[in-house]
Amino acid sequence: MAHHDAGHVSADEQYGETPPGAGYEHTDAHVWLIVKFLLWLAVSAVVIHFGLGLFYQLLIERAQVVGEQPYPLAAAQEQRLPAAPRLQQFPRTEFEQFRAGEEDLLQNYGWMNRNAGIVHIPIEEAMRLTVERGLPSRAEETASPAEPPGLMPADASSGRTMERRRQ
């Protein structure tokens, strides 16, 4: 690099080597500024934490003195139940009662509708009667005459209506 006539050296030559007796590079950031920033940061963090702790303690004490107050519009209303369906209080017991009721329907005789004359019978008895009597079936339909040739489903009918087309 070229020297200037005024006795000044270029920036590259000025920082090219560390001056004798220096314990650090002079181009680094100032350490004291970084240490001051970290000290202020630590002090402010401690002050903020203690301040928040005192504020929360004040709020807790105030809530204990005042107690829980209902909303002004809800104070005049009586206690309401939530909308249905509600959670079960004892689901295991209710399930066992339901299963016992279903087993009673499957294993015993009883009325389903006394006025209509509808009863229920044990499942084993119902299966035995079905085997003896057979299942009801429809009468066989007479064979429908074959469709005349040339009929095809209409385009927009999904097969419900037929129309005559030339092929």
Image (spheres, rainbow, N blue to C red):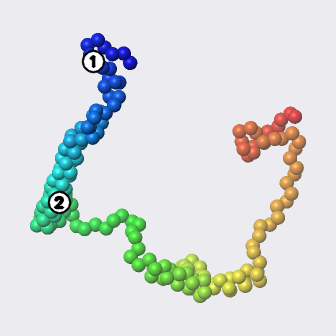
In the figure, 64 relative to 114: above or below? Answer: above
In the figure, 155 relative to 59: above or below? Answer: above
Q: Nearer the viewer, residue 138 or 107?
A: 107
Residue 17 appears in view:
yes
Q: Which amino acid, by three-letter code, is at mark 1?
A: His
Left or right, 1 with respect to 98, comes to left
Left or right, 152 with respect to 121, comes to right
Q: Picture coordinates of residue 103 (x, y %)?
A: 57, 84
Say which quadrant the N terminus sits in: top left
Q: Picture coordinates of residue 5 (x, y %)?
A: 29, 11
For disc 2, the neighbor class at 10 Å (few under 14, some 14 to 19, many from 20) is few
Q: Which amino acid, by three-letter code, is at mark 2?
A: Gly
| Residue placed under numbered mark 1 in the picture | 8
Q: Picture coordinates of residue 29 (x, y %)?
A: 27, 37
For residue 81, which quarter of the picture?
A: bottom left
| Residue placed under numbered mark 2 in the picture | 53
